[in-house]
Image (cartoon, rainbow, N blue to C red):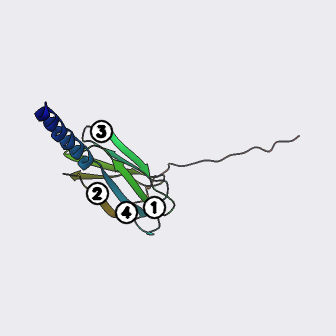
Amino acid sequence: MRISIKILSITLVAIISALTAEAFTVRGRIVDNTLKDPVPGAIVTIASPDSTVISRGTSDGKGTFTVNVDSVTEQLIITVDATSYSRLSLSLSGAGSDIDLGSVAMSPSTIGLAEVTVSAKAVNR
């Protein structure tokens, strides 16, 4: 009976250690590529290579973000989306400890419009 309790205790400690070792944090600061201004409201998504979303976060008014990741895969795909900016994708291999990406620069998106015609009529009341 004592041996079973010891084995159970050792197994439980090993499982808890493995689970806590897997949790980590990804942090950084999203900035405009040209102006170097912070990009608030950028959505940072952490996913596995098969596009399964693992975790998600949003940058604050200073462009900083922190995303907690509770599971680890061999490779992580980090995507950053922000209004008026081109999507940014990063690939990380062997993640498992805290990651500081530092400043992540996003390029403003340029969308060309075809000819636009604006017309109006006077309304008499």
- The secondary element bearing badge 1 is classed as loop
Report the front residue among 47 and 122: 47
Name which residue type carries label 2.
Asp
* Residue at image mark 2: 98
Nearer the observer, disc 3 or disc 4? 3
Q: Farthest right residue?
A: 125
Query: Are circles 2 and 3 on residues that touch, CB within 8 Å?
Result: no
Name which residue type carries label 4.
Ala
Return the x and y of residue 50 as percentages of the image width and height: 25, 37
Query: Are circles 2 and 4 on residues that touch, CB within 8 Å?
Result: no
* Residue at image mark 3: 51
Q: Farthest bottom residue?
A: 35
Few, some or many C-alpha atoms within 10 Å of disc 3 (few <14, some 14-19, many ≥20)? few
N-term mark: 2 or 1? 1
N-term mark: 2 or 3? 3
- The mark found on residue 63 in the picture is 1
- The secondary element bearing badge 3 is classed as loop
- The secondary element bearing badge 2 is classed as loop
Return the x and y of residue 77 as percentages of the image width and height: 28, 47
Which residue is pictured at 33% across the width and 41% down the height? Answer: 54
Query: Are circles 1 and 4 on residues that touch, CB within 8 Å?
Result: no
Q: CA distance from mark 3 to mark 1?
A: 25 Å
Q: Is residue 21 above or below residue 4?
A: below
Report the front residue among 51 and 109: 51
Q: CA distance from mark 2 to mark 1?
A: 19 Å
